[in-house]
Amino acid sequence: MKNIRKLLLLSSSTLLLAACGNTGTEDMDTTPDPEETEQTETANQGDEAEDEASELTETQQVDSVTVEMVNSEGEQIGTAVFEESTEHGVTLNLNLEGLPAGEYGMHIHEVGSATPPDFEDAGSHFNPTDVEHGINSETGPHVGDLPNLMVGEDGVVEEMIEVPNTTLQPDGENTLNNENGTSLIIHTEADDYESQPTGDAGDRQAGGVIFEGTAEE
């Protein structure tokens, strides 16, 4: 009788352990849910796309650009710093020296090149709105028309100029940052603000590239 009871107890214990073991295995099933996995991957891809778009926007945003200005001899005469000012324009800060005393026409030109001694590769005035030159003309001025530059006997220029209706952003209206590029040119005579097409401002004595062109050659 004792042996039979022992056998019954051992059999019961074995069955109980087996049942517990099966329950534990079922509870620990780690097979991933295909639907949950797909949702997680989609969410991660969305986050990556947003990060890339944010980085692209930051890369395109231009707050300022410094132009190295040179004279007809190729000598550096200072800088012209263009800064994004408002949604309607930019600010130009000039710090120049070594220019002859006088009053000179100054314009933004339509090509991102400025090679001494004549700076002719800068092209014509920057005129994306296709109007006449000068504030005294019927339809002007050009976007690239700037006030005359006044240079004292010491040859030093420290001046701030507001340039309306333009931007440094590549996707902005009348942007200086376009496929042809832009440059800043100082002439040898004063601009009369009305003669076509350049204000009778004479030859070009100094210049610098604002933005190089991005158009494929």
Image (tube, grey):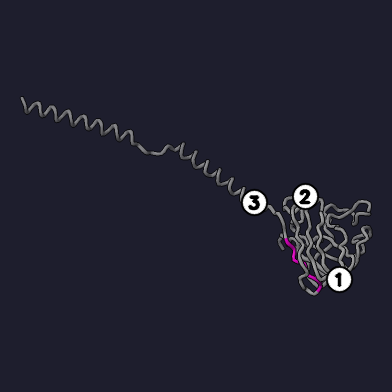
Sequence-wise, the earlier of marks 1 and 2 is 1
The main secondary structure of the magenta stretch is strand
**Residue 158 visible (yes or no):** yes
Sequence-wise, the earlier of marks 3 and 2 is 3
Q: CA distance from mark 3 to mark 1?
A: 41 Å
In the orientation shown, which residue stands out farthest toward the front? 154
In the orientation shown, which residue stands out farthest toward the bottom? 73
Tell me residue 98's x, y (percent): 81, 71
| Residue name at image x 55 percent, y 47 percent | 48
Question: According to the image, label 2 marks what residue?
Answer: 173
Question: According to the image, label 3 marks what residue?
Answer: 58
Is residue 35 found left or right of 111 in the rendered image?
Answer: left
Quadrant of image for the C terminus: bottom right
Question: 214 or 146: which is nearer to us?
Answer: 146
Q: Would you say the residues marked 1 and 2 are in contact, meaning their CB atoms lie under 8 Å apart?
A: no
Report the magenta residues as a range: 66-72
The answer to whether residue 145 is above or below residue 29 is below
Tell me residue 54's x, y (percent): 62, 48
**Residue 120 visible (yes or no):** no
Q: Within the magenta stretch, is there residue 128?
A: no
The answer to whether residue 170 is above or below residue 208 is above
Q: Which quadrant would residue 125 be assigned to in this image? A: bottom right
Q: Amino acid at mark 2?
A: Glu
Tell me the mark number nearer the camera, choosing from 1 and 2.
1
Question: According to the image, label 1 marks what residue?
Answer: 100
